[in-house]
Image (cartoon, coloured by chain):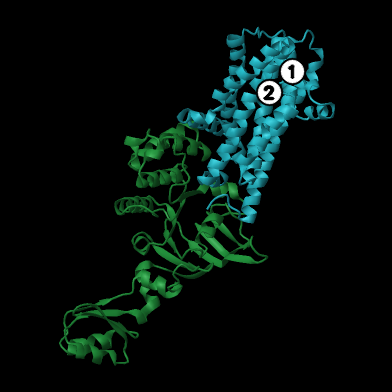
Chain colours: A green, B cyan
Amino acid sequence: MIETRSLGRVYRNRNSAGQVVALDDFTLNITEGEVHGLLGPNGAGKTTLVKILATAVLPTSGNARVCGHDVMAEPGAVRALVGIVFGGERGLYTRLSARENLYFWGAVARLSRGAARRRTTELLGRLGLADRADDPVERYSRGMKQRLHLARGLIGDPPVLVLDEPTVGMDPVATRDFRALVADLRGAGKTILLTTHDMAEAEQLCDRVSLIDKGTLRFTEDPRRIGVFLDRHDAVEFETDDEQLVTALSGHDFVVAVEQTAPGRWRATGRGAVDPLLRWLVDRGVTRLRTERPTLEQVYLHFVGDRGLRL
Amino acid sequence: MNLEVLSAATRMQFSMVVRRPSEAVALVTTPLLSTVVLSIVDRSRHEELVVPAVVGTSLMGLWTLVVTQVGGLVDADRWMGRLELLVIAPAPLPLVVIGRLVAIVSVGAVAFAEAVVVAVVGFGVEFTPRHPVLFASATLATLVAVTGAGAVLSALFVLSRAASQFQAALTFPLYVLGAVVFPVDVLPEWARPLADLVFLHWSAVLLRDAVAAPEVGGNAALLLALFAFGAAGLAAGALITRSVEHRIRAEGTAVMA
């Protein structure tokens, strides 16, 4: 459904004679009906990829196809197939009502007047905006605006949706509702590319996730199997008040580190498989314990590193 | 299908003006400007300047509204992230721009009419065109020409990140150099040829003649030129917009984010 082959994009640096590589040799396949998460720190190249797929930016090398249409050679065909949803306040006519916005964007999506009206009514109901459909958008809450963004992206009923950090700045309730809507869209067979910083969101919604950093693809994997990248980070959480036992455990080869997480609670990170670690603890009477796979966040931090605010 | 896009863009722009009429501030300033200009003409007792003053303030109201609205809509769309979405939408951007211009020029036509109403009601001016067909044709040609000029401006404003700063330069200097309010012979001799380069001057000449000239036989060429200017402006605006779109994609200087 979405294919990129050795995709690259280089920007000229306006402040110097140099260039900035935003995307480098990026190859990715997203199948029909898949929800694909794109993770990466700020400046990793996520937005550049989104803009290339949306035909807003041309690649400088490689190629990208959406439903078989080349984004460079057939931008018109691609535009009819892709709905873009950005996060935040931007992209709406806030003086107008949701209904007026959708009528307009429906026409811009090449719907006839009647079709735009039918689709608007359908989407306003489906996204829970029907009761406020004629209020100016500037009076909407953040969550309502984001639902309207999604409606705008869906107005032309495109088979592919690109959601660019759609839940940024939303409160937890609005975020939960929005994720439920995305799950519904997956159920409806839409192919979705979701860029996000939110690991829980990626784990909850995505069939696969790709990590992008400094313009290159680091890996693509099912978020529930992502721990295979970090076997050595498998950990055991256990409870004991015996600090001598903890000291003894720390000295073993099969342990990378032991840290205290709370009074009487410890977290031991194993080197490779955790079987010897578990056996050692059980043999010494520690029975309140559980194993823990690394989370997507830990994998992310492992690959990207704790870079703070640096890009 | 193109008509659907045009009419949707027109309706949307009308709704925007209705929701915030303050943006059409020229509808308020035009009667005031007409009052000032006509008061000066009235005091000067130069009756031959009355028709040029009425026609001129009408054109000023129309053009001021169009220039401020076009600059404003491009700036607002850019900073609100809508321009990006319009660039990557299935409908061609020039169609959306022209549809919105139709609404803007229609509102501008109200300013055009206001100046006439002020002259008739406030100053007792008899403003009955001697040549109504020419007057109607010249008015239509003026609206087409203003739409075409607006299309070029909006495309150029997309390129500029400071569109609003150009607006001032496109109003009063143009009115003076184009001899829009007063006859061209009021200008210094060296500046008179410049007036011929300003399309609003062509409109002013046609409308003045339609109202007051005894004979108007020689105006057909000017009328055609005004229509042609509008058509050329629409075509050029569409071409420039397309080329701007391509430049944005190629350079990655996305108008947004």
Residue type, label 1: Leu
- Provide the secondary structure element on which disc 2 rests: helix
* Above/below status of B44 relative to B91: above
Q: Does residue B137 appear left or right of residue B35 in this picture?
A: right
Question: Where is mark 1, residue-wise?
Answer: B206
Residue A225: x and y, percent? 36, 71
| Mark 2: few/some/many CA within 10 Å (<14, 14-19, 20+) | many
Q: Chain of mark 1?
A: B
Q: Amino acid at mark 2?
A: Thr
Residue pointed to by mark 2: B142
Give above or below for A264 relative to A300: below
Label 1 residue SS? helix
Q: Are marks 2 and 1 in contact (CB under 8 Å)?
A: yes
Up/down of A170 relative to A40, above or below: above
Residue A164 shows in this picture: yes
* Image coordinates for residue A194, horizontal then vertical, percent: 43, 57
Image location of residue B51, percent across then percent down: 70, 13
Would residue A214 appear left or right of B170 to someone viewing this image? left
* Residue placed most toward the observer, B171 or A269: B171
At horizontal 68% and vertical 46% (from top left) the residue drawn is B243
Residue B195: percent from left, percent from top: 78, 27
Which residue occupies the foreground of this view, A141 or A74?
A141
Q: Residue at x 62, y 41 (%)?
A: B165
